[in-house]
Image: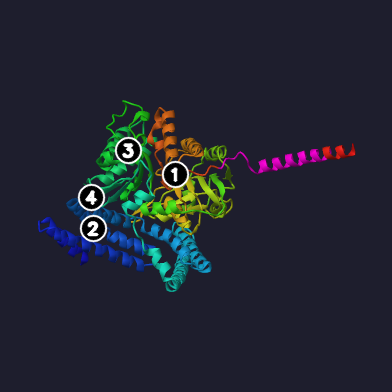
Amino acid sequence: TLYFKAKNHQKAYEAGRGMEQLYEASYWFGQCIELIEYINGTFEESGSKQYLLDRFYYIFEAAINCKYHLHQETDSLQYLEQAFGYAERSKALLLKEAMQMADANFEFGIPESMLEEERRLKKAIIEQENRRYELQHGQEGSNNIHDLNNEIFNLKQEHHRVMDSIQQQYPKAHRARYDVLPMVPAQIQQELLNPGQALLQYFVGEENIFLFVIDREKATLIKRPIEEGLPDAVRKFRESIYGWSQSQGDSLARQYADYGYQLYQSLVQPVAHLLPEHLIIVPDGILEYVPFEALLQQATQPGTQSYASYPFLIRGHQISYAHSAQLLQEMKATDYQAPRQWILAFAPSFQDPPSLENTLVSRRRSLGRLMNNVKEVQSIKSLLRTRIYKGNDATRERFLADAPHYSIIHLATHAKANDEEGEYSYLAFTEIPDSLQNELLYAKDLYSLRLQAEMVVLSACESGVGELRRGEGVISLARGFSYAGAKSLVTTLWRVSDRESAVLMQLFYRQLKEGKPKDEALRVAKLQFIDQNNGARAHPFFWAAFILSGDMAPIAVDQPTFTLWGFVLLGVLFVFLLSRFAKRIRWTLLA
């Protein structure tokens, strides 16, 4: 009823019945969104929250459109700010709640015993849901699914009781978990942006795309109608890149040139005159699958020039990504005080699986051997102090035990996106011999993991893609690591070559060692890779899959020049010199 009331006022405005109708429409659209968020706050189940946001996502588009018209009519910044606020409130709701939860727990003094019980139950629920998923996708044990459903139901009831207890005893903390207040452009200008940097945020509706550009001086809002073939254009653009390695000759070159430039014209060119060199891009909807750095700034004729000379967007812009402005602010503000070790690197091995025939084993069967992942992590160790687990030592159990204690985590392994059930996208570790344990780490497992990582690098296939959900974004391994506490992430958008990945990662860490911000380090590494491969290997297939999100601050370089053995040798030298000095004193006294 509220929505139709708002729409009627907007139609009256469009029919020329005055600005008062637009103000009324704006008010009632605002009431609609307040009601949606109020109802969402009463739900405990993430699935219910997600369904509600997906069901009424069109209301956010209508509200933003109304604020856009008010901004156009009045030139008042407040309406642009309100439109931006609605766009922010429509993004990554559950991820924002999770991050706010940690802050609220600390600020309002919820006892650690109560929090530990809540975490224990959440972990138990995830473990049982994983067991159910594996049984549903295997060929044995299907009779146990009914029992698992009952166990999951009981665990969730127990979890609800704990959450109800927190709500009753600490009502302010409970409210703080769900009071998601969006950032306004003035905050973004002061807290997120450096000189020469801008935030480019998209909202993709059913009828229009809204582009927000915020730099240190001003904020701009542009509306464009959605081109009918946008989803198809994104699909064909991606296909032209990741399908290149399997095509005969360069049959997809024309497709890449066409759609790379077409998407640039649709998504970037309308605001190109507003963009500085350094960009933070907040994509939305289908745009979360787009590697913006590989867009083409000019029309290009394939075959007339090498890939290295293509007008890639990366040539003109240094790009990082974020789920939302507010989440970026949360990631930048996180300060891990506990002492941590330096880099943790995993390079699992993949052998032929046992003969046990079920879907999970056949899934591992498709994971071919990685010939260069050990070389990749060893090249990192040659630059920075690194603890490596490789081969049979690179297990899921070892990762879960050690990951919370490291500042940087690098995983050179296989990953697989799940487009239908994103929380079951997975990373693969070395399989334990003679065990039914499949050594897959699901995105869902990360929700109960507590990291203190400045950066997580997922040098693995498809670690940044998964199921797309309206209002929440892509449910992927990248999102799981953000949930677990990673301040920044390097992830991939498609299946990558491990040989070229090893080269690119070495170039990246070399730039990090020199003290460059992460986005600059990755951009320089990519450009070096392109320029060093003047032939086919300069194609975006080899470098554009890797994207950076989160806090781009330089890492605190801790070089491997003075390790524990250095201190041991120094101690031995000190004892030797001390003994020589003591002998000299003794001989002097005897003389």
Determine if the magenta segment contains residue 450. no
Q: In this view, does 44 lie above or below 496?
A: below
Q: Is mark 3 on a helix, strand or loop?
A: loop
Query: Is 589 situated left or right of 215 in this image?
Result: right
Q: Which of marks 1 and 4 is in front?
A: 4
Q: What element carries label 2?
A: helix
In the image, 451 versus 70, the foreground residue is 70
Determine if the magenta segment contains residue 568. yes
Please tell me whether the stretch drawn in magenta is mainly helix, strand or loop.
helix
What type is the residue that disc 2 sits on? Ala
What residue would you read off at disc 1? 461
**Viewer can see residue 113:** yes
What residue would you read off at disc 4? 208
What type is the residue that disc 4 sits on? Asn
| Magenta extent | 558-583
Find residue 63 and name its label: 2
In the image, 255 versus 412, the foreground residue is 412
What type is the residue that disc 1 sits on? Cys
Find residue 339 and name its label: none
In the image, farthest residue toward the top? 304
CA gap, disc 2 and disc 1? 38 Å
Q: Of label 3 and label 1, which has the lower sequence position?
A: 3
